[in-house]
Amino acid sequence: MPPFEQPRWRHWSAGVSALLLALGGCAVAPSGPVDYSGRLAVQVAAHGERPAQSHSAAFELGGDARQGHLRLLSPLGTVVADARWSADQVTLETGDGPRQYPSLEALARDTLGEAIPLAALLAWLQGQPWAGAAHEPVDGGFRQLGWTVDTHALGEEGQLLARRDAPPTVTLRARLDR
C-alpha cells in the first residue's frame, strides 16, 4: 500500500514529515480559508544511518505566522491532516485525533523530524522573506533561517524551491495551483 493509503499517523524514521504523508482512510474536518493550494514535496538526503526520503502531498495553506492552518489532502482530495495555530495554541488533527503543541516549531520538529519553517512558508509563497527573521538577498531569491529560497519561478510558474544545506540536506518544493 503506498504511503498515501496508510491508515495511521507515524513519524518518519528518516526525519521527514508525517505531515506530508497523506493518510488515505483517516479524514478530518477542514478549517479556515485557503490562501494557497497546490502540491508540496519534501526530500531529505541520507545522513548517517538515515536513508534518503522523498514524499509529497496536496496542500491548502492559509493565515499567517500568528494564526493559520496547513491542510494535507489525499490523492482523492480527502483532508487527512490539518495543522492549526494561533497565538496561544498549535493543534494537529488527524484521523487519530488532535495533538497539541506549544509552538509551530515544536509541531514541525515532532511531526516533520526536521526543522521546516512553517511560520515562514506563507511569506515565502508570496515571494517575500518572512518578517520574523533576518534575511539576505541572493540571485533569484534570498537566504533566511538557514534556507536558500528560490522565488524566480514563483510568478509565472507558481513554483517555489527552498533548500537547507545543513545536514541532512532538506529540499522543499511547492507548486501552486493557478
Image (spheres, rainbow, N blue to C red):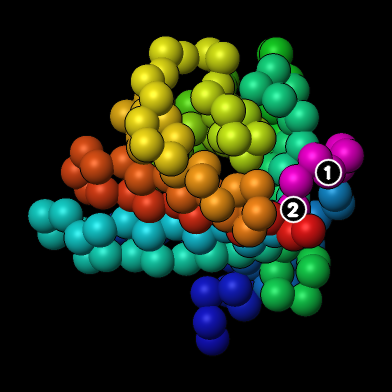
> Main SS type for the magenta part?
loop
Name which quarter of the figure residue 11 lies in.
bottom left
Say left or right for 160 vs 34: left
- Is residue 17 on the magenta stretch? no
Depth check: give the residue in front, 41 or 97: 41
The amino acid pointed to by label 2 is Ser
* Label 2–label 1 contact, CB within 8 A: yes
Quadrant holding the C terminus:
bottom right
Say left or right for 7 vs 33: left
| Position of 99 relative to 2 (above/below) | above
The magenta segment is: 31-37
What residue is shown with label 2?
A: 37
Q: Position of residue 81 (x, y in %)?
A: 69, 53
Say left or right for 147 vs 111: left
Quadrant holding the N terminus:
bottom right
Residue at x-position 55% and y-position 22%: 130
Q: Crowdedness of circle 2 by 10 Å Cα count: few (<14), some, many (20+)?
A: some
- The answer to whether residue 136 is visible is yes
